[in-house]
Amino acid sequence: MDLQEFIIQHQDDDVNLLALKRESYPQISTADMTFALQQIEGRQKCQHKLPTFYANQLLLYPVRLSVEQCSSEQTAKYKQKIASLTCECKTSFADLTAGFGIDTFWLSEIFDKAYYVEQNAELCKIAQHNYDALGRKNIIVGNHTAEEYLQSAIHHDLIFIDPARRNKAGKKVVKLEDCQPNLLNLWPEIQSKSTYQMVKLSPMIDLKEISKQLNPQQIHVVSINNECKEIIAVCQTEKTLEPTTTYCVNIQGEKKDVLFFSAEQEHSCEITYATELKKYIYEPNGSIMKGGAYRLIAHRYNLEKLSANTHLYTSNELVSDFPGRIWKVEGQYDKRDNLKQANVVTRNYPLSAEQLKKKLKIRDGGDIYIIGTTLGKKAIVVKGVSKVKNER
């Protein structure tokens, strides 16, 4: 049996079970079976994450970690859109930590020439094979470290970098100076070799630290189905005096909820704090919460905030286009309701959701929600909350 035929024939099989049946395929060498299992697993992980790649059966996939760490097609396309709107000239760009090459592939679509830079030789071979199979001829693959490439690099319209968020010991890190390569050390040279810079960062990073260290023109907080996936900083070597704009983006299929603002707009918003709970409770999507638009969201949607540190909002009139979850309030929880099953969440409440669930002797599930939160200075538990809109 041809190896490619074997991979396609077994592309939906459980990889672990297939490995245990190794003896059933004596015609396939041990090395070829290891390669086949890697390709099957890669295709399975990319079926929904990278549908364009998955559709091409000629493509190769690297080891699991490289597939897991690469951008999704949705977030890569979003970076392409950012670059398209930001860069006036699109002669060339370089990806200094290209990995599996997903961001390089989508960004190369709008530039005349793209430079894929990667220190792992095996990933370079895979990327070259895939770009050839996809007919992308304007990408130049180079097996270099970011530091090596920058020493002799031409000036680019854009340099993109996604530093590895693990140190040399393999431990996860968040700070820019702890990543590999050390972004802060490289930053002056990156800026000297490019007009614009785009940096992909951990969703756990402190946005204030990004602002201090990189002085970005834009910060994009990108979520897929309300799960924060990436922070993208867009910088300019000759930065204007305009304040940094934060974009909170939640992608759901073909739909995008986008809220953008400056720090000054957030701080200067006049909002109203609720003195009582009204008919609806609102919770912003994950990107807005990470981006810190706590006052702005209340101002723009004419909502009352439950308290200064409670990032939930309320109103009597339904605001159906609110970018996040909406629940209809039935009242405050009373033990006499004798609820046995509900979905329990807590926001700025003395107990965790698990602790509150245990205290109320409620098991998970059903259509009812119990929310432990704080209204003003008072901790409250809201009962019988049915979903009006759910982004999770």
Image: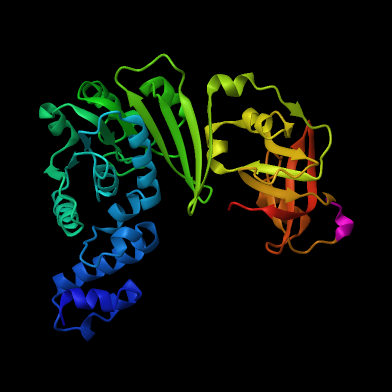
310 lies above or below 370? above
Toward the right, the furthest residue is: 336
Quadrant for residue 274, please give it. Answer: top right
> Which residue is at the front of the view, 290 or 53?
53
Structure colour scheme: rainbow
Q: Quadrant of the N terminus?
A: bottom left
Q: Foreground: 344 or 387?
A: 387
Taking the spot 35% from the left edge, 25% from the top edge, the residue there is 235
Q: Tell me, yes or no, if residue 204 can be seen here.
A: no
Q: Quadrant of residue 184?
A: top left
Q: Residue at x 17, y 75 (%)?
A: 3
In the image: residue 32, left or right of residue 293:
left
Q: Is residue 8 above or below residue 119?
A: below
Is 25 magenta? The answer is: no
As for residue 334 lying within the magenta part, the answer is yes
For image coordinates 17% across by 31% down, the residue present is 147
Residue projecting furthest to the bottom: 24
Vertical relation: 220 (above or below) 52:
above
Q: Which segment did they paint magenta?
A: 332-337
365 or 53: which is nearer to us?
A: 53
Q: Position of residue 55 (x, y in %)?
A: 30, 65
Residue 247 x, y percent position in the rendering:
49, 33
With 253 as the anchor, is 275 left or right in this view? Answer: right
